[in-house]
Image: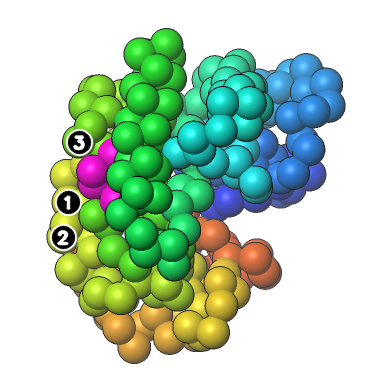
Amino acid sequence: MKIGVGFCLSELEKYSPHFELLNIENPLYPNYLTKKVSKDIKFINGRTKNKAVIIVDGAYIDLNPGTSEVQIRKIVMKKIDDSIQFALNINAQEIVFLSTYIPQIEVDFYIKSHIDNSIVFWSNFAEKYKTIKISLCNTFEYNPEILLSIYRGVNKPNFNLAFDIGHALAYSKIPLVDWINSINGIFDTVYLHSNDQLGDKHLNFDEGCLLKHVTEEQILKLFEKKNIILKSFSKNRVLELKTRLEKNSVF
């Protein structure tokens, strides 16, 4: 089990001395990849040479790999490609893309189209970039079935799922433990945060309602061999929470 933190590059020097797992969020931010990023890449590489694991968040806002619109698909492909190139340039081991599936559109043709188009889309990228793990992470899904269908359809050794426990807490219609068990063995990275189930608040994991659904001991056992990334918006307690997880873990 490795414990890391998600952060913006402006916080790299603050957190890199304390974590062996670093989650760089910048490509997730709108328009970040439209600027020249060579200086940022040089900055990262100069300060992370001895880090065991770097995980990058890929571009997300307004991007839908499952789209049937050809012109939109080309734009999405460009942003995904830019994200992966960025990750490769900083020697990241994994890049995680949030799903853009909208579960409220409960019509069969949308569901089938999203799955079929996503399989083709991610298969192409997994084949093109075989040296990096590409993972698809839950966002608004009610359950993991759509993600599992895409994962099985892609069927590439470098294509995985990732799990955001806060998103599942906010939007899932099944128990958290059932969700985790459903994807057991096909995800390596967990984004750990909580919320109040009124929205995606990204609270610290011991705030909100997460620990009303699972105990801290269950979290540690369920994720004993995973990369755990502390993903709260407020980072004023990340060092405290990292120490607490390490102290309580017996794995």
* Residue at image location 63% in from the left, 26% down from the top: 71
**For discs 2 and 3, the disc positioned in front in the rendered view:** 3
Frontmost residue, 49 versus 55: 55
Marks 1 & 2, CB-CB < 8 Å contact? yes
In the image, taking residue 61 as reference, residue 99 lies left or right, namely left
Query: Looking at this view, is 147 or 47 the one in front?
Result: 147
Measured as percent of width and height from the top left, residue 208 is found at: 50, 85
**Amino acid type, mark 3:** Arg
Q: Which residues are magenta?
A: 146-150
Is residue 224 something one can see in this rendering?
no
Relative to 55, say whether 133 is above or below: above
Total of numbered circles in the picture?
A: 3
What amino acid does circle 1 point to? Answer: Asn
CA gap, disc 2 and disc 3: 16 Å
Q: Which residue is mark 2?
A: 181
Cα separation between marks 3 and 1: 14 Å
Q: At which x and y percent is residue 213?
A: 30, 83
Q: Position of residue 20 (x, y in %)?
A: 48, 40
Q: Position of residue 118 (x, y in %)?
A: 39, 35
- First in sequence: mark 2 vs mark 3: 3
Q: Do we see residue 168 in this rendering? A: yes
Determine whether 185 is above or below 94 in the image: below
Q: Amino acid at mark 2?
A: Asn
Q: Specify whether 157 is left or right of 11.
A: left
Task: Give the number of the disc on residue 184.
Answer: 1
Residue 89 covered by magenta stretch: no
Q: Please tell me whether mark 2 sits on a helix, a strand or a loop.
A: helix
In space, the residues marked 1 and 2 are separated at their CA atoms by 5 Å
Pick whichever of labels 3 and 1 is earlier in the sequence.
3
Foreground tag (3 vs 1): 3
User: Residue, x 74% and y 44% (percent of image)?
Assistant: 30
175 or 213: nearer the viewer: 175
